[in-house]
Image (cartoon, helix red, strand yellow):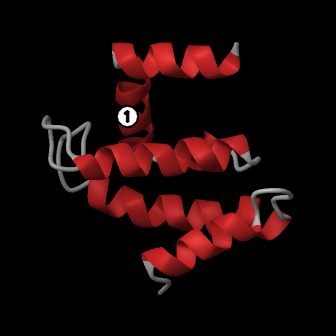
Amino acid sequence: MKTQGQRKIEWVKNIANATDHFKNEFAPNYYSLLEGFYAQHDGPYLLGERITYADFAIFQSIHNNTKIGASSAFLQDALARFKAAFDARPNIAAYLASCDA
């Protein structure tokens, strides 16, 4: 099992040109690992209804992966609910809209 540091190194290596391995194996495996944690509570956040710093970090990692070509279609139930809830937060939605403008 890879450590968080190893995951970051893998992500940095793929910033300029995400490999098929990163998009089709690494990111889906990462999402599957996260799904196990998020599925432990009714959510949508890691600890249930209360948002934590960890949720911001996880959202950023999913967003960053999407920006370099990894599909969010690999997100399973709990993680997809988490992303939808985070996307719906007014300040996050406004920030994302400003990035895409």
Q: Residue furthest bottom?
A: 1
The residue that appears at 36% across and 37% down in the rendered structure is: 82
Secondary structure, mark 1, is helix
The residue that appears at 15% across and 49% down in the rendered structure is: 47
Image coordinates for residue 25, horizontal then vertical, percent: 69, 68
Please identify the quadrant where the C terminus is shown: top right
| Side of 99 relative to 21 (left or right) | left
The amino acid on which the numbered mark 1 sits, given as a three-letter code, is Arg
Q: How many marks?
A: 1
The residue that appears at 49% across and 78% down in the rendered structure is: 5
Image coordinates for residue 68, horizontal then vertical, percent: 74, 48
The residue labelled by disc 1 is: 81
Give the vertical position of 28 relative to 77 (above or below).
below
| Side of 63 relative to 57 (left or right) | right
Image coordinates for residue 22, horizontal then vertical, percent: 73, 66
Give the vertical position of 93 relative to 19 (above or below).
above
| Side of 1 relative to 50 (left or right) | right
Image coordinates for residue 11, horizontal then vertical, percent: 65, 65
Give the vertical position of 90 relative to 5 (above or below).
above
Q: Residues within 10 Å of mark 1 (few under 14, many from 20)?
A: some
| Side of 26 relative to 41 (left or right) | right
The residue that appears at 81% across and 59% down in the rendered structure is: 18
| Residue sitting nearer the eye, 79 or 65 | 65
Q: Which quadrant would residue 48 be assigned to in this image?
A: top left
